[in-house]
Amino acid sequence: MSKAPKVVMYATPTCPYCHAARDLLQEKGVTYEEINVAGNPALRQEMAARSGRRTVPQIFINDRHIGGYDDLDALERSGQLDPLLGPR
């Protein structure tokens, strides 16, 4: 039996792209860790260091940087997201 992937999303509570990413992950039945970077410069710096980007959301699957919501959605539309997420 395969282990569930570790999904981490750096986000803020009010970002519309963060909401869209949450919705997509929840529709997929994915359990994920959300790191709220709002008002936390240290966490935002950590996100930027890991991703090379300063915008939210930034999504990682098993420590692989996926990108933001547009990148996540593109993986979904191309059929490449499910293989990354594995069995759920």
Image (cartoon, rainbow, N blue to C red):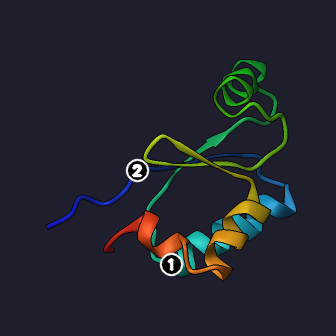
Q: Is residue 7 above or below residue 69?
A: above
Secondary element at tag 2: loop
- How far across and how far down the image is residue 50, in percent? 63, 29
Q: Is residue 88 above or below residue 65?
A: below
Q: Position of residue 60 (x, y in %)?
A: 56, 47
38 sits to left or right of 3 = right
Q: Is residue 35 above or below residue 32?
A: above
At x 75%, y 70%, the residue is 20
Identify the residue at horizontal 75%, vertical 54% (top origin).
68
Q: Looking at the image, how many numbered discs can be counted on the residues?
A: 2
Residue 71: x %, y % from top left: 73, 61
Position of 81 compared to 52: left or right? Answer: left
Q: Closer to the camera, 80 or 58?
A: 80
Q: Which label number is shown at residue 78?
A: none
Q: Residues within 10 Å of mark 1 (few under 14, many from 20)?
A: some
Instruction: For the C terminus, give its image quadrant.
Output: bottom left
Q: Residues within 10 Å of mark 2 (few under 14, many from 20)?
A: some
Marks 2 and 1, Cα distance to the nearest angstrom?
Answer: 14 Å
Instruction: In this rendered view, identify the residue nearer to me: 39 or 26.
Output: 26
Instruction: Tell me which amino acid carries mark 2.
Output: Lys
66 in relation to 44, above or below: below
Q: Secondary structure at mark 1?
A: loop
Question: Which image quadrant: the N terminus?
Answer: bottom left
Q: Name which residue type carries label 1.
A: Lys
Which residue is found at the position 72% from the left and 47% from the top?
A: 11
The residue at which mark 2 appears reads as: 6
In the image, taking residue 84 as reference, residue 86 lies left or right, namely left
Residue 69 position by quadrant:
bottom right
Question: Mark 1 highlights which residue?
Answer: 28
The numbered mark, 2 or 1, whose residue comes first in the sequence reads 2
